[in-house]
Image (tube, rainbow, N blue to C red):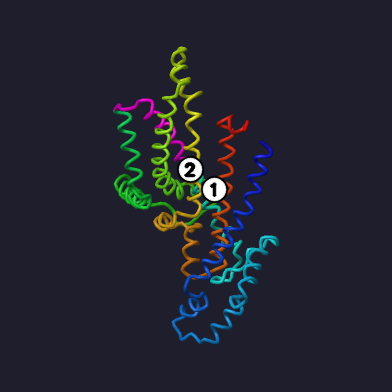
């Protein structure tokens, strides 16, 4: 097991290096220039000499190998660089948004698991009954319904219901407050986007849980357990469900990693200043430095998540651990 963990950690290095090379080259192939964007924003004539001076100051005229070396060298000095658009340290720009995105991803994932595992289990155990059809309808609706559209419905529902009950419309706060500073204010803002996002991913996980559990329930050792007279609940909880969790864990891990940087539209609906919104702004402004670091952050999150999922595999399935 120790050798397995060490090998997986060492494999992260070439993966991250490959991602760094790819994002560096792709960004340089994209048309546009951050200096032109900055000067065009003033509405005035952009002097070519001023653009050249701006490019020199930002290091855009340096050889590509020098720029790449500066990009990679920053990781060894714990310096992510300066944003080309805001002229602020990238580490600061990411830090103020990372907490919000991380909490939202954790809350949405928790709600997804809380909904998906019980419903998927019920749907598999009660196959082709009205409970199974109800769960399948619930999951299909969640897959078909975009999370941002559900978020709009939640906001409208809150406005209409609070207006009808209390005479004053209420909607979630638009200013982020850390959880430990004001728990109620924090949860009143993030519980709704977490619910809107978590419902969709719960629908995906529910269908995966149902499919995996149905396959396990048809195995010979499950029939043997029934023949021995074991209780149905004991068979499901101790034998079937644990073995059916491998594909479900994979889906949940991928969903969590995606939530860290992929909630662009949902963040716009709930006015959340998270990593997704920062990502879009960096791309639109041709901020190479910021875009590179955000891509590397998302890549690192995916790699770490996959690593943790692999460890969960070894815990759930002893055959992987012993191998």
Let me know if residue 127 is in the magenta part. Answer: yes
* In the image: residue 122, left or right of residue 98: left
Where does residue 39 sit, x and y in percent of width and height?
49, 80
Residue 171 in the image: above or below residue 131: below
Q: Nearer the viewer, residue 243 or 113?
A: 243
Which quadrant is home to the C terminus?
Answer: top right
* In the image: residue 38, left or right of residue 73: left
Part of the protein shown in magenta: 107-129
Q: Nearer the viewer, residue 220 or 182?
A: 220
Mark 2, Cα crowd under 10 Å, few <14 / some 14-19 / many 20+, is many
Which numbered tag is attached to residue 179? 1
Where does residue 188 sit, x and y in percent of width and height?
45, 47
Q: Magenta stretch mostly in which secondary structure?
A: helix
Where does residue 80 sit, x and y in percent of width and height?
63, 63
Q: Secondary structure at mark 2?
A: helix
The answer to whether any part of residue 309 appears in the image is yes
Which quadrant is home to the N terminus?
Answer: top right
Q: Nearer the viewer, mark 1 or mark 2?
A: 2
Q: Residue under circle 2? A: 109
Where does residue 287 sit, x and y in percent of width and height?
53, 69
Q: Earlier in the sequence, mark 1 or mark 2?
A: 2
Determine which quarter of the picture holds residue 8: top right
Q: Nearer the viewer, residue 269 or 71?
A: 71
Let me know if residue 192 is in the magenta part. Answer: no
Which numbered tag is attached to residue 306? none
Q: CA distance from mark 1 to mark 2?
A: 17 Å
């Amino acid at each position: 097991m120790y050798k397995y963990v060490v090998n997986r950690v060492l494999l992260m290095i070439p993966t991250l290096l490959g991602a760094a090379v790819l994002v560096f080259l792709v960004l340089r192939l994209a048309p546009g220039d951050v200096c032109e964007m900055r000067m065009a924003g003033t509405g005035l004539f952009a002097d070519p000499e001023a653009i050249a001076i701006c490019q020199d100051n930002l290091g855009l005229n340096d050889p590509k190998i020098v720029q790449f070396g500066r990009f990679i060298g920053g990781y060894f000095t714990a310096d992510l660089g300066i944003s080309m658009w805001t002229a602020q340290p990238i580490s600061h720009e990411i830090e103020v948004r990372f907490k919000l995105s991380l909490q939202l991803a954790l809350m949405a994932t928790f709600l997804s698991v809380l909904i998906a595992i019980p419903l998927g289990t019920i749907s598999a155990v009660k196959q082709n009954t009205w409970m199974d059809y109800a769960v399948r309808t619930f999951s299909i609706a969640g897959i078909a319904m975009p999370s941002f559209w559900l978020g709009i419905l939640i906001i409208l529902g809150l406005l209409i219901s609070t207006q009808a009950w209390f005479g004053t419309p209420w909607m979630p706060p638009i200013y982020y407050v850390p959880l430990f500073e004001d728990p109620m204010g924090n949860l009143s803002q993030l519980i709704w986007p977490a619910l809107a996002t978590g419902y969709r991913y719960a629908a995906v996980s529910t269908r995966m849980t149902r499919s995996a559990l149905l396959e396990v329930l048809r195995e010979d050792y499950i029939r043997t357990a029934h023949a021995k007279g074991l209780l149905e609940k004991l068979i499901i909880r101790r034998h079937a469900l644990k073995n059916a969790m491998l594909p479900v864990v994979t889906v949940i891990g991928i969903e969590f990693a995606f939530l860290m940087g992929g909630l662009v539209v949902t963040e716009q609906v709930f006015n959340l200043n998270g990593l997704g919104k920062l990502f879009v702004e960096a791309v639109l402004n041709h901020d190479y430095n910021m875009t590179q670091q955000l891509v590397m952050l998302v890549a690192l999150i995916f790699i770490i998540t996959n690593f943790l999922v692999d460890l969960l595999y070894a815990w759930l399935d002893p055959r992987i651990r012993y191998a």
